[in-house]
Amino acid sequence: MKALGVRPGVKDSLELLQVDAPGEAEGGVLVEVIAVGLCGTDKEIVSGEYGEAPAGSDHLILGHENLGRVVSAPEGSGLAEGDLVVGIVRRPDPEPCAACAKGQWDMCRNGKYTEHGIKGLHGFAREQYRAEPDALVKLDPALEGVGVLLEPTTIVAKAWQHTEAIGQRAFFDPKVAVVTGAGPVGLLAALLGVQRGLEVHVFDQVEDGPKPDLVKALGATYHTDTLTDSGVLADVLIECTGVPSVVMETITKHGLDAVTCLTGVSSTGKRLPVDVGAANREAVLGNDVVFGSVNANRGHYEAAAEALKKADGDWLARLITRRVPLDDFGKAFERQEDDVKVVLDVQGA
């Protein structure tokens, strides 16, 4: 069968492979892949920046954002032929550590977790895969056209869940939220903020194209100025760019008792002059919290599935700006001006 893979650490080694069909030892549920979403992580793996093949393999099948349909499943698994499913990306470490043993592999304590399409496990950019039932999340049939957005939604579902948990340290009644970055993760973060009844402000640089309209369609406010210049003082800030100057703004420009969640992974090697004393003073006197968040556990997948189910389907569909057949995978990695989310159509290849 067809699969899209790389040789980890080898720049531009992306190619369409012929691989064996998955064996039953890989899991009791056989899944036909419908679509795979692409993100910055995939591009960095293609660039050879990181990525780890499974033991004994010289290649890594790409793809962690995914949507599939059950071909067959064991009795009593809670799954049946035809069900829409998403494979959970991170799997617990084999020991397991205390966090993984509690189903919180997103908080793995020893770093021995694996991740489909990223670290030690083949990804979902292939025609079929197998998994155990507990590694799959069932979706509402109405999400067939947009279910591939579930994995990026899990990232912000975790961000919001942790933000709200931290907020319970004391009086917490947020009214205003800021999201920096209007890529897929930022837009989905804004969606979850609006669903919580908050006044949401989204900051990005682009002045036209689909992003401003997508934000406005949520009932949120779109900004092209800086957070500093806007004068917006948020109670909750979700940072989705990883841009150092933007990160520093979210840490220092907000209301009192604010909670800032950093989800954007920054590139290294860039230096930014920072008045650490001033930043510390503001954080201490303002009772601020700044925390980082990555990946998600099953609870976040289930929360994300509920959020997508409640969202406007037409709005979600607008996030997917291009669908590219698997055979034309090269085009999917060619950046276009109005791209928001690009998806590989696996069965349409």
Image (cartoon, rainbow, N blue to C red):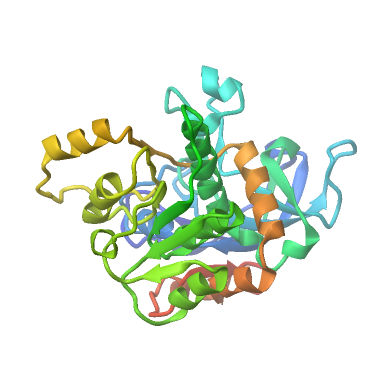
Q: Residue at x 67, y 68 (%)?
A: 312
Work out whether residue 219 or residue 285 is closer to the camera in this orientation and state it: 285
Work out whether residue 96 or residue 261 is closer to the camera in this orientation and state it: 261
Residue 213 seen: yes
- The image shows residue 38 at horizontal and vertical percentages of 49, 62
Total labels drawn: 0
Q: Which quarter of the rendered picture does the N terminus lie within? A: bottom right
Q: Which quarter of the rendered picture does the C terminus lie within? A: bottom right
Q: Residue at x 53, y 55 (%)?
A: 198
Work out whether residue 337 or residue 4 is closer to the camera in this orientation and state it: 337
Q: Quadrant of residue 94?
A: top right
- The image shows residue 120 at horizontal and vertical percentages of 48, 39
Up/down of 271 relative to 37, above or below: above
Q: Quadrant of residue 280?
A: top left
Q: Residue at x 43, y 23 (%)?
A: 110
Residue 113 seen: no
Work out whether residue 345 or residue 220 is closer to the camera in this orientation and state it: 220
- The image shows residue 284 at horizontal and vertical percentages of 25, 30
Q: Residue at x 73, y 65 (%)?
A: 144
